[in-house]
Image (cartoon, grey):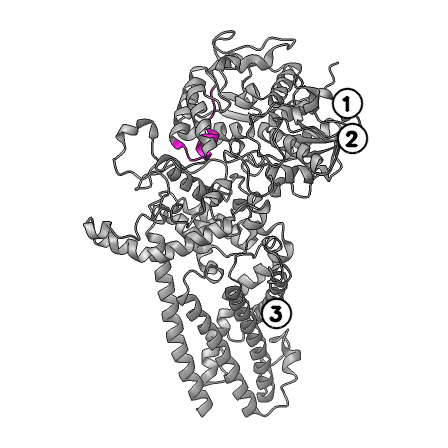
């Protein structure tokens, strides 16, 4: 064996030992860090559905559906990794014998074709990803505002370049090696040295056939060594940097996707994860006296996170797709789901050794006094308080994440600790909690007003327990909701739905003053105790009322009643009013005629997908089918359906001031106005309020003299608190949209205007 080969073998052996050792060390560190998290039962079973989902998500790359170029490029780079590992094994043999081939499969046609195809595709794929990054990365010459528009803002660019360079060097080495193998085989007269065995590299190998055999042998050894050294260097780098998610995600993502919250592949949206104790079991806060004195409610320190939460943060690829979709980040607020995830990742990695040491030491005073334990995530600045409370829980981050990170669940769990343990929440929420507790609604209005919306209707609205004995006597129990009962714009929707159901011959009844808030704003603000109290009360009321089928107009009530109440024992068939009306249209029980005025034929409508109806519950078609049935032309906004931009009211933001950056509702309203539509249709009262105020603010900012003043008289830029005077039929004319300013209305209101009453 020549001196070159001896040196190559020694270097490869040393590099391999160091690389594998470093990689194993990094893997052990990550596993230990993840294991410091709390137990989370149910994330390993059922095995069959989880494996099926894993295969579908990994091979199908479904979360890349809106980025076709990135989807294809990332897929081929991902698949090339395991395929080209075979060439790494071959490379070790080539250090000793340049003509080495793996036994049995070394010159097997399918394997050779796959290697060459994925080497070229990997080269093209990584090239495309490099171009995408270079075109969209933030640049030093840009202002911070310009840099924030890049999804890579805050990502570690150096780490990304290391990964890209590694992939680039490996695939180039594979292609060069294949061409050299072909040239060497031709010189030897080997039967396998044909274009059939080298379909995509024979043309390149032809350039080497005139070289001396010794030269070709040396070239094979050198290139194989370079490939091995590059691969092992990458192992060393990632092993020494267990927080390098851009590299580790190719291993961790498989586990993270498998252990996702929903085994069937649905995103971790809709219902929130329950508040859990230290053993991972759901906590019942209606029996507070049974809680241990040292109970920690929610996530206050990083070790309070469940193990899946710690695996989430370790898996983050820093791709920034969550940041790119976040309405808070887009409007200048400090919340970036990516940056919050990275902060938790780095903090977890730094404190995990101390947590393990303290647990190993048991309950000793010294162990419990360790300053690295119980570090308040918000109080210490790991999580910025403004960022925490800026979240609208719209779920765009979860929907977009390619590795199934459950951002919303983590954010709400941190809010739970701040609210329940520290009483550290925005001041406005204190009043909201009090109103919910005392009056059963966030407006703080008396329950006797819950039926005011029905005054003046041409038919009676039966009340369960007064006009009918049980909800079983009617087709549907109509859950009006707090907004539908107290907020005038939402009251228009309630009346419209009631009239449409009546016109269709569908019987319904309401609970009247028996209703109380579903608890959605309390839960998403972290006040799990208040939510459970309200939920238990409502479940009892609905059960006693004999309710089996419930129709709601509020997307938040819809999500809570249908997706969260089953955990409280309340299992009902719950539909959104757009679903029921769409069903009635399909049955021929509702027909529509051309509208008049703003709803006349030829006028266009743009539809805003409420987050809690669309992204959280996948209801996209019924609202659009209803508009089509009414003969309305829909002008879609650029961001619609899964990528719809939030109105800004979710996550209890309806009840908090919006003082940082632009108002989310105003930005969304501007997008709607840009479509040229005369009407902005919604299907949620929160969206109606926020977009209505947003349209007014946008028009004033544009200098439109016909724009209405803010409904509550607030100055420009003030946030919607949901308490402003309504723009409903009973509101002063000055608060209604004027000519040239799009009207914001629920779909039911638009349908009522076009109802064929014949």
Quarter of the image containing the C terminus?
top right
Q: Residue furthest top?
A: 467
Q: Which mark is residue 120?
A: 3
Q: Identify which residue is drawn at 47% across, 9% down.
A: 465
Q: Which mark is residue 603?
A: 2
Q: Which mark is residue 751?
A: none
Question: Against 662, is 2 above or below?
Answer: below
Question: Against 244, is 605 above or below?
Answer: above
Name the residue nearer the viewer: 637 or 226.
Answer: 637
Q: Identify which residue is drawn at 77% across, 31% down.
A: 740
Name the residue nearer the viewer: 16 or 374.
Answer: 374
Q: Are marks 2 and 1 in contact (CB under 8 Å)?
A: yes
Q: Mark 1, residues whose alpha carbon is within 10 Å: few (<14), some, or many (≥20)?
A: many
Q: Identify which residue is drawn at 28% across, 55% down.
A: 356
Q: Quadrant of residue 385?
A: top left
Q: Secondary structure at mark 3?
A: helix
Q: Secondary structure at mark 2?
A: loop
Q: Which segment did they paint magenta?
A: 516-528
Work out whether mark 2 precedes mark 1 in sequence or the reverse, and give the earlier one.
Answer: 1
Q: Secondary structure at mark 1?
A: loop
Look at the image and say whether residue 519 sits in the magenta stretch: yes
Q: Mark 3, residues whose alpha carbon is within 10 Å: few (<14), some, or many (≥20)?
A: some
Q: Viewer-nearest of labels 3 and 2? A: 2
Name the residue nearer the viewer: 64 or 610.
Answer: 610
* Residue 607 shown left or right of residue 310 in the figure: right
Instruction: From the top left corner, tell me how far across and down residue 89 is, in percent.
Output: 46, 74
Question: Against 541, is 429 above or below?
Answer: below
Q: Is residue 567 visible?
A: yes
Q: Which mark is residue 595?
A: 1
Instruction: From the top left corner, tell me how far across and down residue 153 is, in percent.
Output: 56, 56
* Residue 656 shown left or right of residue 357 in the figure: right
- The residues tagged by marks 3 and 2 sit, at their Cα atoms, a distance apart of 52 Å
């Amino acid at each position: 064996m020549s001196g070159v080969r001896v040196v190559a073998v020694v270097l490869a052996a040393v590099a391999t030992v160091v690389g594998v050792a470093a990689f194993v060390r990094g893997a052990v560190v990550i596993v230990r860090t993840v294991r410091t998290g709390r137990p989370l039962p149910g994330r390993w079973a059922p095995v069959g559905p989880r494996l099926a989902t894993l295969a579908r998500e990994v091979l199908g790359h479904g979360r890349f559906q809106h980025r076709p170029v990135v989807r294809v490029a990332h897929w081929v780079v991902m698949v090339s990794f395991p395929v080209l590992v075979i060439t790494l094994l071959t490379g070790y043999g080539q250090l000793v014998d340049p003509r080495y081939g793996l036994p049995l499969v070394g010159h097997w046609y399918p394997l050779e074709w796959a290697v060459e195809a994925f080497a070229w595709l990997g080269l093209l794929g990584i090239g495309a990803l490099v171009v995408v990054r270079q075109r969209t990365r933030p640049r030093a010459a840009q202002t911070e505002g310009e840099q924030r528009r890049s999804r890579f803002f805050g990502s570690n660019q150096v780490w990304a370049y290391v990964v890209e360079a590694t992939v680039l060097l490996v695939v180039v080495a594979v292609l060069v090696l294949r061409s050299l193998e072909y040239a060497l085989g031709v010189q030897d007269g080997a039967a396998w040295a044909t274009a059939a065995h080298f379909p995509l590299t024979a043309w390149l190998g032809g350039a080497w056939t005139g070289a001396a055999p010794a030269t070709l042998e040396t070239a094979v050894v050198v290139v194989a060594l370079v490939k091995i050294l590059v691969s092992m260097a990458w192992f060393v780098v990632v092993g020494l940097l267990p927080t390098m998610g851009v590299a580790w995600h190719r291993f961790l993502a498989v586990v993270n996707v498998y252990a996702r919250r929903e085994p069937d592949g649905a995103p971790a949206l809709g219902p929130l994860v329950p508040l859990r104790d230290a053993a991972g079991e759901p906590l019942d806060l209606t029996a507070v006296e049974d809680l241990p004195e040292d109970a920690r409610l929610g996530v206050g320190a990083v070790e309070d996170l469940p193990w899946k939460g710690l695996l989430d943060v370790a898996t983050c690829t820093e791709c920034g797709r969550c940041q790119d979709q976040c309405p808070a980040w887009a409007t200048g607020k400090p919340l970036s789901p990516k940056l919050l995830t990275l902060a938790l990742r780095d903090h977890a990695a730094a404190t995990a050794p101390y947590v393990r040491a303290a647990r190993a030491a048991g309950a000793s005073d010294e162990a419990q006094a360790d300053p690295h334990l119980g570090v308040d995530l918000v109080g210490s600045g790991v999580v910025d308080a403004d960022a925490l409370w800026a979240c609208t829980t719209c779920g765009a981050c979860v929907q977009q994440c390619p590795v199934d990170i459950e951002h919303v669940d983590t954010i709400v769990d941190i809010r739970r600790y701040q609210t329940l343990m520290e009483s550290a929440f925005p001041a406005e929420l204190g009043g909201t909690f009090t109103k919910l507790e005392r009056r059963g609604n966030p407006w703080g209005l008396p329950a006797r007003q819950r039926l005011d919306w029905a005054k003046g209707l041409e038919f009676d609205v039966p009340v369960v327990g007064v006009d009918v004995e049980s909800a079983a006597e009617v087709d549907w129990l109509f859950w009006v909701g707090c907004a539908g009962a107290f907020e005038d714009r939402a009251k228009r929707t309630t009346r419209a739905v009631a009239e449409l159901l009546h016109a269709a011959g569908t019987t319904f009844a309401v609970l009247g003053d028996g209703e109380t808030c579903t608890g959605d704003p309390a839960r998403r603000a972290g006040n799990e105790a208040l939510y459970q109290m309200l939920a238990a009360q409502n479940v009892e009321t609905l059960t006693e009322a004999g309710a089996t089928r419930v129709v709601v107009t509020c997307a938040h009530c819809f999500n809570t009643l249908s997706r969260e109440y089953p955990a409280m024992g309340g299992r009902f068939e719950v539909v959104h009013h757009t679903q029921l009306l769409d069903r009635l249209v399909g049955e021929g029980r509702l027909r529509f005629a051309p509208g008049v005025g703003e709803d006349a034929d030829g006028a266009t409508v743009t539809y805003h997908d409420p987050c809690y109806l669309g992204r959280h519950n996948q209801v996209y078609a019924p609202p659009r089918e209803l508009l089509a049935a009414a003969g309305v032309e829909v002008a879609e906004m650029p961001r619609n359906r899964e990528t719809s931009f939030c109105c800004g009211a979710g996550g209890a933001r309806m009840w908090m001031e919006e003082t940082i950056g632009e108002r989310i509702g105003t930005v969304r309203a501007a997008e709607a106005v840009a479509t040229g539509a005369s009407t902005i249709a919604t299907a949620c009262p929160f969206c109606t309020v926020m977009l209505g105020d947003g349209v007014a603010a946008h028009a004033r900012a544009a200098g439109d003299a016909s724009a209405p003043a803010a409904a509550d008289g607030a100055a420009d830029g003030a946030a919607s608190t949901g308490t402003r005077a309504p723009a409903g039929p009973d509101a002063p004319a000055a608060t209604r949209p004027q000519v040239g300013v799009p009207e914001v209305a629920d779909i039911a209101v638009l349908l009522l205007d076009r109802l064929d009453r014949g």
